[in-house]
């Protein structure tokens, strides 16, 4: 993958700082963050409240820019882009999933999922087909015409995930995606994120407070006090086994 020397990482934060406010009330939320993420990675971002996770996710999601330092996305310097250019980058390359699902009420699953394509100006026919495909991909074929109120929390999060992947993003940013769900639904959502990563190659960046959910990631990055305090591979990610694990090389 693109971790080879000389190959640009999909994402690289270089000495990124973020300061909120000015003068005596200034608060430095990020104090020099270095982070390289290869295409296909699945990163769990952990750390205590106030450690800078949300600030880093806003940065990675191109919703905010560093005070100092660099953010490269596929070699493009995000910190030099205009607001419009960042919005275009978000629309074309990033998908977002939130703790609270953030679906439009009184709007069908199908219409919620079509929304990002509407913003892109795609035809009704293309929108319908892509949304139906994305809903099937998250296991909600047949639920297209239900509104959020008619769906369980787990199903609502599936609709939100379908909305995030309908544009075929390179990266899925998930901010505590299981924070509002019970244990069983949480594991179902993690199995889904795992499949999107392993089967579909979507890079996943997920903030979580729960070790059981971080266990699905390939890598665990821990923030403490505005810096990356540890960054370790997870040698045995939870989730379905890959073909290579089921059929070891010697048995092939
Ligand atoms: P986490 O997501 O790990 O809880 P945050 O990134 O939200 O951490 O916050 C890091 C620090 O920055 C905290 O001290 C928080 O109070 C501060 N902070 C976050 N957002 C703002 C803001 N918009 N204005 C001022 N301070 C902020």
Image: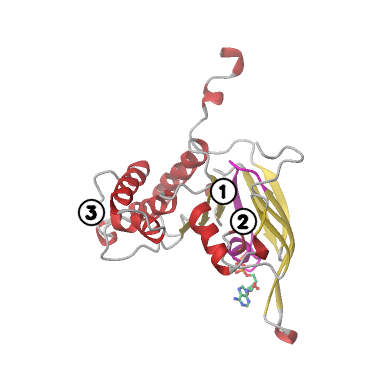
Query: In which quadrant of the rendered image does the C terminus lie?
Result: top right
Q: Quadrant of residue 151?
A: bottom left
| Residue 161, position as x, y percentages in the image | 41, 51
Q: Is residue 56 magenta?
A: yes
Q: Residue 46 carries which label?
A: 2
Q: Name the residue under label 1.
A: 214
Residue at mark 2 to residue at mark 3: CA–CA distance: 36 Å
Image quadrant, ligand 1:
bottom right
Q: Report the magenta residues as a range.
A: 37-58
Residue 107: x and y in percent read 27, 62
Disc on the earlier residue, 1 or 2:
2
Name the image quarter holding the N terminus: top right
| In the image, residue 147 above or below residue 28 | above
Q: Residue at x 23, y 53 (%)?
A: 145
Residue 241 image position (x, y, % from top left): 51, 30
Left or right of residue 154, residue 246 in this image: right
Tag 1 and tag 2, C-beta contact below 8 Å: yes
Query: Which residue has dot 3 on it?
Result: 145
Mark 2 C-beta to ligand 1 under 8 Å:
no
- Going by the image, does 110 lie left or right of 232? left
């Amino acid at each position: 993958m693109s971790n080879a020397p000389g190959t640009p990482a999909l994402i690289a934060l270089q000495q990124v700082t973020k300061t909120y406010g000015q003068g005596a009330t200034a608060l430095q939320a990020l104090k020099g963050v270095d982070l390289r993420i290869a295409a296909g990675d699945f990163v769990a971002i952990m750390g205590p409240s106030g450690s800078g996770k949300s600030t880093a996710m806003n940065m990675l999601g191109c919703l905010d820019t560093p005070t100092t330092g660099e953010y490269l996305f596929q070699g493009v310097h995000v910190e030099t882009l205009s607001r419009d250019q960042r919005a275009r980058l978000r629309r074309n390359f990033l998908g977002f999933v939130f703790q609270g699902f953030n679906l439009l009420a009184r709007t069908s699953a199908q219409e919620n999922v079509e929304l990002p394509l509407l913003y892109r100006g795609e035809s009704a026919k293309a929108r319908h087909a892509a949304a139906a495909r994305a809903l099937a991909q998250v296991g909600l074929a047949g639920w297209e015409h239900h509104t959020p109120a008619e769906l369980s929390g787990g199903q609502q999060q599936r609709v939100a995930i379908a909305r995030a992947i309908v544009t075929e993003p390179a990266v899925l940013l998930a901010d505590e995606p299981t924070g509002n769900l019970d244990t069983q639904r949480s594991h179902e959502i993690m199995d889904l994120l795992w499949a999107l990563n392993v089967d579909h190659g979507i890079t996943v960046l997920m903030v979580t407070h729960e070790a059981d959910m971080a266990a699905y990631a390939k890598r665990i990055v821990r923030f403490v006090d505005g810096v990356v305090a540890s960054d370790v591979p997870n040698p045995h990610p939870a989730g379905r086994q890959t073909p290579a694990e089921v059929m070891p090389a010697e048995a092939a």
